[in-house]
Image: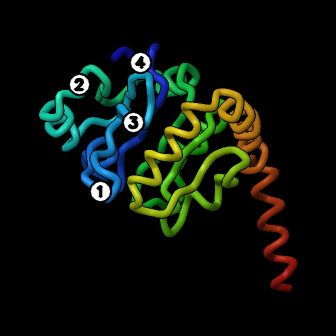
Amino acid sequence: AHLAESLIVSLVGGGLGPDLFIMQGSGGMITAERAAEKPIATLQSGPAAGAIAAAGMTERISLPGRESDAMGVLRRADLFVLSSRYEGFPNALCEAMACGLPVVAFDCRSGPAEIVRDGVDGMLVPAGDVGALASAMSKLTGDPERRRAMGARATEVSERFSIDGVAALWESVLERRA
């Protein structure tokens, strides 16, 4: 798969292995085939490469690794998936949203829920629930209008986390403490 024709840019992190794409679960095998109709590109390579090759899915999932023009890749994508099980403040999530991408992310202990407005500019699913992640990916890939609407709202992240926006948040916290 070439990045220009990929639907989903996924940042695999937080110890997630190939189970994002291939996992035996109560619903049977969850694969990229069920999650999206177009190819998937992930900006990081790693332990998933062997499992993806063994499953014969190298035509559907590309692992180009680091990209010198990550923002350009994001602008060509239609959906961003953050599959990290652990996060602080995921800048990659904000960057994807600033590019107008709706997002699907695990609702891990910190990070995504502070950024993503569930149902407004993306979808949060229970942390570690790969089936729910695949289902959310499928819902958004199958609904271009919803994807566009969420993507339009996702750009608001730039204002919400701008210098002025964050300064206002801090002022609010300090005023409550005074």
Check disc 4 and give the amino acid type.
Leu
Residue under the image location 27 percent in, 50 percent down: 23
Ranked by sequence position, the earlier of labels 2 and 3 is 3
Point out which mark residue 25 bears. 1
Ranked by sequence position, the earlier of labels 2 and 1 is 1
Task: State which quadrant residue 48 falls in.
Answer: top left
Find out whether the residues at labels 1 and 3 contact each other: C-beta distance under 8 Å: no
Q: How many marks?
A: 4
Is label 4 in a helix, a strand or a loop? helix
Q: Position of residue 131 (x, y in %)?
A: 40, 53
CA distance for labels 4 and 3: 20 Å
**Residue carrying label 4:** 3
Check disc 2 and give the amino acid type.
Thr
| Relative vertical location of residue 44 with respect to residue 106 in this rendering, above or below | above
Point out which mark residue 34 bears. 3
CA distance for labels 2 and 1: 22 Å
Residue under the image location 57 percent in, 55 percent down: 124
Ranked by sequence position, the earlier of labels 4 and 1 is 4
- Of badges 4 and 3, nearer the viewer stands 3
Along the viewing direction, whichever of 73 and 168 lies nearer the viewer: 73
- Of badges 2 and 1, nearer the viewer stands 1
Is label 2 in a helix, a strand or a loop? loop
Find out whether the residues at labels 4 and 1 contact each other: C-beta distance under 8 Å: no
Mark 4 neighbour density, 10 Å: few (under 14) some (14–19) many (20 or more) = many
Task: Please indicate whether residue 70 sits to the left or right of residue 158 in the image.
Answer: left
- Of badges 4 and 1, nearer the viewer stands 1
Q: Position of residue 155 (x, y in %)?
A: 72, 36
CA distance for labels 2 and 3: 15 Å
- Of badges 4 and 2, nearer the viewer stands 2
- Of badges 2 and 3, nearer the viewer stands 3
